[in-house]
Image (cartoon, helix red, strand yellow):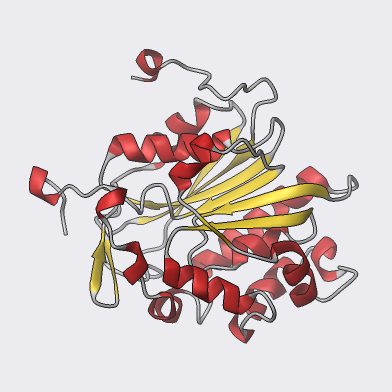
Amino acid sequence: MEYGTTADQKQNADVRWDDFDPQEYIRHNYLAMQAVDEEIISRVRDHFSDHFRGSGRVPSGIDVGTGPNLYPALAMLPWCDRITLLERSARNLDYLNSQVYGYDPHWDQYWDILCEDPAYAELDVTPRVRFREAVQQPEPGSLFDLRADTRRWDLGTMFFVAESITTSLEEFRRGVGCFMGALKPGAPFVAAFMEHSLGYRVGEFEYPARDIDGAEVRKELENFTPDVKVYRLHNPHDLVRHGYCGLILAQGTRATDFDGTPLLTASERQ
């Protein structure tokens, strides 16, 4: 699938997100852990552990566009008191609510990778209890709603969202900005992206994507913080579907002097 003509363009508001099938998505992507997810989880774990070790929990974390993926939230469990799971799709919200009081067993394999760090292995309660305490109630809302939200979070994740909801470069850029703007100065973050995605199918429905690469990710994040590392995770034998080249993982810490506007102006970004 290619989005080369005006007729092919699709923005976030054009998508029937309430038709998104979480069980089909889980079956294809998360029921058995992929090697690339193990690498992502390990990097997220180490990034948060290196940042927070010895400092105790912060009040709040956010996972933006959670969908039916719990492992970003699991990676935050030792580090914050409350976790906001922000999700637009009604069916995904139903799934997330069903997981709060006891998530499904297939998520245990992801927790096992996190437990290679003692901060996760030595929680004072079980991960399911900690998840229930921290999440409580998943929150309906869009990534773009964060622009008008006055709350700010102490750490954040955004996995396969900004580039996987639109074909528009402007919306991709705006989405990255909304995510970064929701974080407090000094907050650690991790964001994951599909590299050169041409769109994807879940069940009976096709969903759009913006074709981006690591350079585009770096450029957008460096508008908000100079402290960003970008990794390209690529193994052609591990691709879970056609229509993309690999994964991009970005991690860093939001600039402490960030005031809600990009560090570079729009003209300087070109």
- Residue 19 appears left or right of 34: left
Q: Is residue 68 visible?
A: no
Vertical placement of residue 210 versus 245, above or below? above
Q: Quadrant of residue 253?
A: top right
Q: Quadrant of the C terminus?
A: top left
Q: Is residue 206 above or below residue 83?
A: below
* Left-right relation of 183 to 213: right
As drawn, which residue projects farthest toward the bottom? 105
Residue 241 coordinates in the image, percent (x, y): 31, 70
Q: Judge left or right: residue 152 versus residue 28.
A: right
Q: Is residue 236 visible?
A: yes
Residue 231 placed where, x, y %? 51, 46
Give the tally of numbered discs: 0
Along the viewing direction, whichever of 88 and 2 lies nearer the viewer: 88
Q: What residue do we see at 9% from left, 48% from top?
A: 7
Q: Is residue 43 above or below residue 220?
A: below
Residue 215: image quadrant is top left
Q: Residue at x 16, y 60 (%)?
A: 1
Seen from the viewer's position, the closer of residues 165 and 39 is: 165
Q: Quadrant of residue 235?
A: bottom left
Q: What residue do we see at 53% from left, 19% from top? A: 263
Q: Position of residue 168 (x, y in %)?
A: 27, 41
Q: Residue at the spot x=29%, y=37% of the render?
A: 169
Horizontal side of 57 relative to 266 (left or right) equals right
Which residue is nearer to you in this view: 221 or 156?
156
Measured from the top left, where is residue 51 in percent x and y? 77, 43
